[in-house]
Image (cartoon, rainbow, N blue to C red):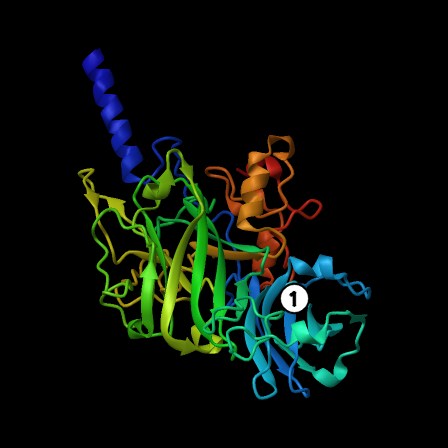
Amino acid sequence: MKKTISNLFKISLSIVLLYGCNLSSPEEIVDVSETSNVLSIPAGFDFSTHQKVTINIVENAAYAKYDVYAYSDVSVKTPTESELAGKLVFSGVPSNGVLKQTISLPTYYTKVYIRRNENQNISVTAKDILNQEVNFNSTEAKSTIQTTSSKSSADIDSDGDGVLDQDDAYPNDPEKAFNFFTPSIEGSGILAFEDLWPSTGDYDFNDVALRYQSVVYLNAAGLAVGFDFKYQIISNRAGSYNGIGFEIEGIAPSQIESVTEPILTIDFIKLNPNGTEAGQENAVIILTDAIRNTRVGADFILRTVSVKFVNPISTSDLGVAPFNPFLISNLYSNTQVFEKVRDHEVHLPNMKPTSLGVLLRGKEDPDGRYISQSGYPWALSIIEYSVSIEDVMLREADTTNANEKTYFTVPKDTIAITRAYNFFKTWAESGGSEYKNWYTNGSGFRNESLLQ
């Protein structure tokens, strides 16, 4: 009897490993049937919850400092500066009368607020987003606030970069002057993956999920000199050593001076001397080759990977975080020997694999679009403007408000996202035109008991 029980245990353990479940809290594998719970999405729909918006500012004065904020309030009341503060996306001073940046906003956001400061005469102007653009001319500004700062102190430029100390985020560093946040100074993004691609999964999107924020460092001319990518793993329900990284399309590895603090522990990622991944046409940054090894003790902690450029580049060339993110899906073989599989990349819908990735077309993804035959993606990207990584960490440590999560939360094991979020299906089948904020905690939007 003992031998029989032992054999049954070994068989059960093998099955758990084979299908990539978390050994500490195994996730039951429940495939989504091709004939049930199918999504009928419009052609070309990419499941994006955010939009790229180009901000074009024309300045007629010799010098003025701008702050651009994301804002979704549909009321006509101009928000206070304290209400806007957490939604700051970027700052800058126009060069030759022009300031231009492309930002990422939730698709349900319809406006931005532009704060202009010319010699302590401050205006805050609401501008609608039209055709994914915002156009602002300084002649539109109407001063609403005046301060009494002395002119002598306001004229100081300690590092000589052309940006006054009062406007310079780095007044003693001539290479940096401003910050560009994605999503915002107090916002964060979510990347959530199903790791069984190209096989059908259960679409609970909790195999791997991380929260992130990108901070791009701009010089006085508004060009990027580098960036920090902050992230924290919030769900790891897979049994394999999945890795994660992102590709910066259009940026060559040679344009990167250095990449610091990636976590590489299982020796199958090859790096160039500058820290980018070797063998890639575009610059590829690997955050880690083994997500499970980024813990400190039992907890996943906030991590930062820093990237510095050889020469400043425009943010239009850089693109917007999270760039082209992907999961490196490592698998166990049939003999339960762990395989270090580098070419098995899981991407967001309609994105392409890197030079080292292989597009595995099969029954479930015949077109290689990372969208299954049943209409589901294998990865989702969501951005939130009201929740920072640090704020989430504090809220989750506060057990008194454990059931009051205002941010996106991944479903529990085997709970398809269509069950956890009541309007995900409606949103997807409308091509993203209905319930654009399906992932928020609006009344009746989600089933809290089905979320982690």
The residue under label 1 is: 69
Q: Vertically, is 321 above or below 174?
A: above
Q: Position of residue 231 (x, y in %)?
A: 45, 51
Residue in the foreground of this view, choosing between 197 and 310: 310
Residue beneath the point at 51% across and 78% down: 161
Please identify the residue farthest to the top as the structure is shown.
Answer: 1
Please give the name of the residue rendered at 48% of the width and 70% of the height, measured from the top-left corner: 176
In the visual, does 365 lie left or right of 418?
A: left
- Total labels drawn: 1
Residue 406 sits above or below residue 172 on the image: above
The residue type indicated by label 1 comes to Tyr
| Crowdedness near tag 1: few (<14), some (14–19) or many (≥20) residues, C-alpha within 10 Å | many
Of the pair 105 and 391, the residue shown nearer to us: 391
Observer able to see residue 324: yes
The location of residue 107, given as percent across then percent down, is 61, 64
Q: Is residue 151 above or below residue 87?
A: below
On screen, residue 174 versus residue 77, left or right, reads left
* Residue at 46% from the left image edge and 47% from the top image edge: 205
In the displayed structure, does residue 137 sit left or right of residue 185? right
Query: 312 or 301: which is nearer to us?
Result: 312
Residue 444: x percent and y percent?
Answer: 69, 44
Q: Residue furthest front?
A: 152
| Location of residue 436 in the rendering, given as x and y in whole percent from the top left corner | 63, 59
